[in-house]
Amino acid sequence: MGTRQIELEVMRYNPEKDEAPWFQQYSVPCEEDWAILDALIYVKDNLDSTLSYRWSCHMMVCGSCGMTVNGEPHLTCKTFIRDLPDKVRVEPLENFPIERDLVVVLDDVMQKLQLAKPYIIRKDDPPPEDEEYPQSRAALKKFKQYTMCINCMLCYSACPQYGLSNDFIGPAALSLAHRYNLDSRDQGKAQRLDILADHDGVWECSFVGACSEACPKNVDPAAAIQQMKVDGTMEWWKQKFGLTGDKP
Amino acid sequence: MTIARKALVWGLFAAGGTLTSFVFPSLIALFLLIASGNTPVGLEYGQIHAFAASWMGKASLFGVIFLALWHAAHRLRVAAHDLGLRVDGLVASVLYLVAALGSALAVYYLVLI
């Protein structure tokens, strides 16, 4: 296989030394089948060991190598050199503070994922250990798509609403909540909606749909949020007319 | 925490959107049919007028007009925000007021029929 010379323009930032982020050029001889992540690894191993970036699995499972490639949020392990021009600009994910170089601080989103109460909530006592909550294949199909999220946070990087205000709970956390709301074994929908259909929850989404376009796992968070708006509206009317015994 | 009152605003918006997406294409199709001299049977002027003059017809027409106006107002409000106009209070007040005015006029003219 031949190699192709790629000019990599990488954003660098060391908060202890630099006043502002800046760009560094690297000329990388890339193999035909390389992804951007391979080019970054080449830089780290051969050209500049001070470059910082996150990665782990190199196979679209761990969700840690999300970066902005030529202006768009991508997993760098599935963004291939062969689909890109000779000059590629790599920046950290947008809408997050930079920890160093291409590494961003994800604390805010980690907190928001917890708001979604991403676990099965039951009103009854937990069943004896040798029993299970059975679920049909059809019931699983209803939410399976939303279980595919790998928390790569490309959706937060793409979301203009989150860019405007970090108070917005945001796509991944909301679609994670929706995954549990749709789960036939779960009974915690009203509890979740009480938090997620509040002011900074689903209503802040203006349905731009950038999250679903950015998602590398086809989760479609935008659809989850619109469906939660319907659920939130129904729940609001239920609460108004006192039809719900679900109030936490 | 409780579910925000935004649920009500959004609920009307969603209802308006769903309704409009069915009703308005039909209206356009009906307009084109009538304009080209192919008035569908049962939808002649007299019949539609009789429908609009009944209380049932008036209520339905009001529902469609009110929800469509509310939908448009809310859509414009969100669009203004997305386009960078960040005075939501003012934008929302003006747009919802226009929708309310339109709805009030609809009531006036529907009662006159």
Image (spheres, coloured by chain):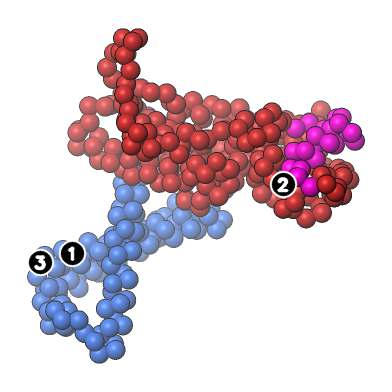
Chain colours: A red, B blue
Q: CA distance from mark 3 to mark 1?
A: 9 Å
- Residue at 33%, 53% in the rendered image: B14
Q: Is residue A165 left or right of residue B102?
A: right
Residue bearing mark 1: B60
Which numbered circle lies on residue A181?
A: none
Q: Decide: is A206 above or below B104.
A: above
Q: Is residue B52 left or right of residue A217?
A: left
Q: In the image, residue A158 lies at what x, y percent?
A: 59, 46
Q: Is residue A13 magenta?
A: no
Q: Decide: is A132 above or below A94.
A: above
- Residue at 90%, 35% in the rendered image: A47
Q: Secondary structure at mark 2?
A: loop
Same chain under badges 3 and 1? The reply is yes
Q: CA distance from mark 2 to mark 3?
A: 64 Å
Residue A84, can we see it? yes
* Mark 3 in CB contact with mark 1 (< 8 angstroms): no
Callout 2, which amino acid? Answer: Phe
Q: Quadrant location of residue B56?
A: bottom left
Query: Closer to the N terminus: mark 3 or mark 1?
Result: 3
Same chain under badges 2 and 3? The reply is no
Neighbour tally class for label 3: few under 14, some 14-19, many 20 plus, Cα within 10 Å: few
Q: Quadrant location of residue A25?
A: top right
The residue segment tinted magenta is A32-53
The quadrant the C terminus of chain A occupies is top left
Residue bearing mark 3: B55
Residue bearing mark 2: A80
Q: CA distance from mark 1 to mark 2?
A: 56 Å
For the view shown, which residue lies furthest in the front direction? A1
Q: Secondary structure at mark 1?
A: helix
Q: Decide: is A122 above or below B108.
A: above
Q: Is residue A44 left or right of residue A35?
A: right
Neighbour tally class for label 2: few under 14, some 14-19, many 20 plus, Cα within 10 Å: some
